[in-house]
Amino acid sequence: MEQGTVSDHMRATDPLSAEWVTVVLLVVVFLMALINMSSPRKWRLLGQSMFRMRLGRQALREEMDLQDRAFLGLLLVATGVLALFGWQALTVRGIAPVFPSLVGLVAGIILAHYLVLRTVGALTRASAGLEEYLYTGFLIFILTGMVMLPLVVLIAYRTAWRPGLILAGVVMLVLLLLYRWLRGAWIGMGEGVPLRYIILYFCAAELLPVLLVIDHWRSTSSPLFHS
């Protein structure tokens, strides 16, 4: 009985395994199960598109409808998972973020990406390639959420593994970001966009924000990398 009380006390004092974290993870799993029941074909179609360098017109027309509830549900799942990973990583570093704020931040980044690409497409009238890159970004965002979900679960309940899991998560995020940029450059060159314009876009609209985030991350005190 005493052992159970000690275990419960340790769980209560560990914010990464708090009850609300379990609730968030259960909601994520429930949404994924609901999507699987309502649109089982969506998983296969999205899986095929995630690893193709170019998306065909049929895929863009049938699979990437922002009014599709399954597609929106997967975006919501990925948003929740990435926000939770960010909250876990910052909490381990000794920072006390507010999880709903991180959800809003991740959603805001996705919305800003959508608006920037729509604006660039309207100004340059290169809508075909930008439309494909936009939905490619959504696909990779969903893929990132699926890949990060097991890590987020283990971080919550495996205390001793947390430093290594967070590092693995950061590496995974970097690799998927590079994959996204590679596909973006491939799409741009396939649409006849000069390489200098592609590089200019990535530097101004995507690389600079990432560097700012990395600089802020390194400037904070880090119990993860400093003993």
Image (cartoon, rainbow, N blue to C red):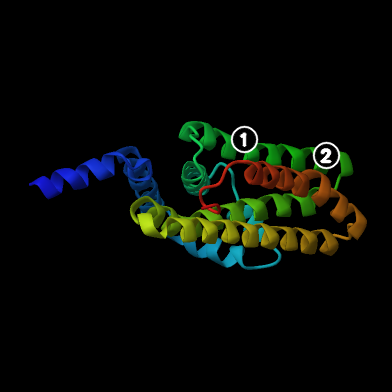
Q: Which mark is residue 219?
A: none
Return the residue at label 1: 108
Type of the residue with mark 1: Gly
The residue lying toward the viewer, choosing from 140 and 10, is 10
- Give whichever of 101, 29 is nearer the camera: 101
Locate residue 4, reporting x and y percent.
14, 47
User: Up-down: is 221 above or below 59?
Assistant: above
Secondary structure at badge 1 equals helix
Q: Earlier in the sequence, mark 2 or mark 1?
A: 1
Residue 14 percent across, percent down from the top left:
33, 43
Q: Residue at x 38, y 44 (%)?
A: 16
According to the image, label 2 marks what residue?
122
Q: Is residue 55 visible?
A: no
Dividing the picture into quarters, in which one does residue 6 lie? top left
The type of residue carrying mark 2 is Ala
Mark 2–mark 1 Cα distance, whole angstroms, equals 21 Å
Is residue 26 shown left or right of residue 147?
Answer: left
**Element class at badge 2:** helix
